[in-house]
Image (cartoon, rainbow, N blue to C red):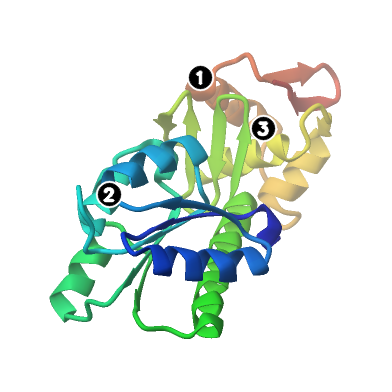
Amino acid sequence: MSTSKSKVLIVDDEPDILEFLSYNLKKEGFDVALASNGKDAIETALSENPELIILDIMMPEMDGIEVCQKLREYEQFNNTLIAFLTARNEDFTQIAALDYGGDDYITKPIKPGVFLSRIKALLRRKKRKAEEEVVNVTRIGDLTIDREQFVIKRNDNIIELAKKEFNLLELLVSKPGKVFTRDEIFTKVWGTDVIVGNRTIDVHIRKLREKIGDDIIKTVKGIGYKFEF
């Protein structure tokens, strides 16, 4: 993840802290927005849509934990990183901050190098998670295939599929528009060591169409089937 494209919102009621953090982040190529109280923090976050928010806890208007809690109520901040940077080091404050949606808890004072390392580590973690989700989840139109949870959704409605139905759909979706021959489907879904009847594929296709709709799995007569959205 290129830090030059990473927008960070810093929220603190101390001008010196804002200046110090902003200087060090900008020096590393981050795009920085600032807010000095809880109310402005929410308004700025909504307009700037930062990738990472650094929150002080003790602030006027609204404390940092409450800000974090309110931000998490907005869908657009579901995956936004929120790190607390505060002089408060009590266990109960840290627990509350993380329970209400914080991703990290950093105590002041902190050296610039350590601070930047923590921020970069958070962004790397987010990037890895996003990459894993791309591998495990396929979205085409209103259809979502989640390989990790073994779940199919269409228009946000969960559709229950048997294992072979899931594997068959996953195969067809892997190359939209490609016609998979019956032999290909048998080999990749059932394997070469399994003997099944000639109507097996047809039965599974019929069940798939009943569950997800008959508009996206096309029959190519005499050859096989394809996924077309």
Which residue type carries mark 1? Answer: Glu
Disc 2 from disc 1: Cα separation: 51 Å
Residue 131 placement, left or right of 96: right
For the residue pair 183 and 96, the one nearer the viewer reads as 96
Looking at the rendered structure, the secondary structure element under dot 1 is helix
Report if the CB atoms under discs 3 and 2 are less than 8 Å apart. Answer: no
Crowd class of label 2 (few under 14; some 14 to 19; many from 20; radius 10 Å): many
Residue 178 placement, left or right of 163: right
Report if the CB atoms under discs 2 and 1 are less than 8 Å apart. Answer: no
Crowd class of label 3 (few under 14; some 14 to 19; many from 20; radius 10 Å): many
Where is residue 16 drawn, in percent x and y? 41, 69
Disc 1 from disc 3: Cα separation: 14 Å
Q: Against 198, is 6 above or below?
A: below
Which residue type carries mark 3? Answer: Ile
Where is residue 67 drawn, in percent x and y? 27, 50
For the residue pair 9 and 180, the one nearer the viewer reads as 9
The tag earlier along the polypeptide, 2 or 1, is 2
- Residue 201 has which mark? 3
Q: Against 18, is 112 above or below?
A: below
- Residue 210 has which mark? 1
**Residue positioned 54% across, 67% down in the render:** 125
**Residue positioned 82% across, 16% down in the render:** 221
Where is residue 144 drawn, in percent x and y? 55, 35
